[in-house]
Each structure stands twice: as C-alpha cells, then as structure tokens.
Amino acid sequence: MGDVNLEIQLPKPKFNGDMSLEEAIFNRKSIRSFVDKEIEIEKISQLLWGAQGKSISKRTVPSAGAIYPLEIYVFLKNKGLYHYDIRKHTLNLEIEEEMNERFLKQLTEFSLSQNFIFEAPLNMIICVNFPKIIRGYGERGKRYALIEVGHCAQNVHLEAVALGLGSVPIGAFRDKQISQLLKLPDNLDPIYIIPIGYAK
C-alpha cells in the first residue's frame, strides 16, 4: 500500500470472483493464527465493499428502513486506523502511523488479550449509531441494528474465504476502552471486531 495517506482511494470492487458462494460457505472457519503478510489493497477493497459497499439496491447488506446505522473502521498493521467512507469508497486516516504499535497492543489488551488480534494485518471494527436507528424505530431499532451487524459480518467472513484469507469473529472486548481507543463519537458503539489475514 506504500506510504500512509490521509485518504486512500480503494480500487473498484469486482462483482465476479473465482469461488462460488456455496464453496465460501462450506470452507468458512474461524482462523486464529496469521502469517506476517500485508493484505493487498484490492482485497481490502473487496472486504469493505462486502461489509457496506454500494450494490444494485443501495448497500450490500439489508437495513431496516434503509437507515444504515453502521460505521466501519479498519486498523491496518503498520499503517494506522482508518474510517471507511461508503459513498466515496475510500479509507480516511483517523489515527496516525506513529501510534501503530501502542494502538495494536491496546486493541489486543482491551479485547481480553486475544493475541490473534495483534497478529492480524487487518482488524475490522463494526460500529453502530444506535441513536440514528432509534429515531426511526424506537427501542426496537437496537435489535434491527444488531441484526444488520450480523449481515455485515457474514459478508466479510465469506468474502475473506473467497479471497484466500482467514477471519475470526470477536465479540468479547471492553466496550468503553475500545470506544476511547478508537476515539469514537458519542453516538457510535463498537459491536464486532474481525481480525483478517493469511492463515498460518
């Protein structure tokens, strides 16, 4: 990926891959050990498109009332923390490279020291803007948002398999510390972490 940029324009996603959906479902498993190898920018693009990209409808995942309360962050090892801009299909730098090692150690520590987080070249963090969906659906909106997180994560896990990558779902972490580490605004809550990389 070269030097760290404030904004990374992601390549246009491909809509036809080498692996069928059925093969990806069959081959999906949790991977908890990764080699020290950077993920190509084309594959990062595909993962993010699968998570929340544009589709023939509006997005690649369904959302109650088309409210779309999810926000996606990715931590790229040796690069920094980025926010995914769905409209522009870009990554925007949130935390600079010099904070990289300390950030990654804290991300691992606040996730109950699950060390594969530290190993992974990419960690995706799915966050929810609960106030946004509650405005449309009241307290029931919380359920709809969590269902949407599941749609998003499943796309990512299957896309990872199709790209020759491994991933693992993480729900065990200290919410407040993760929010502070990511410097999230008050309206966002971290819900799901997905370490992704090449399996050992």
Image (cartoon, grey):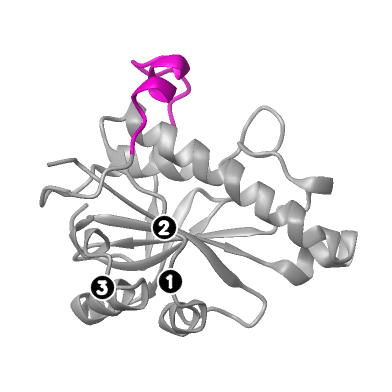
Please give the residue where the numbered disc 2 appears in the rendered image: 170
Q: Secondary structure at mark 2?
A: loop
Q: Are marks 1 and 2 in contact (CB under 8 Å)?
A: yes
Q: Position of residue 112 (x, y in %)?
A: 33, 73
Q: Which amino acid, by three-letter code, is at mark 3?
A: Leu
Q: Is residue 165 left or right of residue 153?
A: left
**What is the spatial separation of the Cα atoms under label 1 and label 2, in whole angstroms?**
8 Å
Tag 2 or tag 3, which sits nearer the N-term?
3
Q: Residue at x 27, y 72 (%)?
A: 113
Q: Residue at x 73, y 45 (%)?
A: 63
**Location of residue 78 by image quarter:** bottom left
Of circles 3 and 2, which is in front?
2
Q: Which residues are magenta?
A: 12-29
The numbered dot on residue 173 is 1
Q: Which amino acid, by three-letter code, is at mark 2?
A: Ile
Q: Which amino acid, by three-letter code, is at mark 1?
A: Phe
Image position of 111 with respect to 124: above or below = below
Please give the residue where the numbered disc 3 appears in the rendered image: 104
Q: Is residue 28 magenta?
A: yes
Of residues 98 and 77, which is closer to you in this image? 77
Image position of 162 with respect to 71: above or below = above
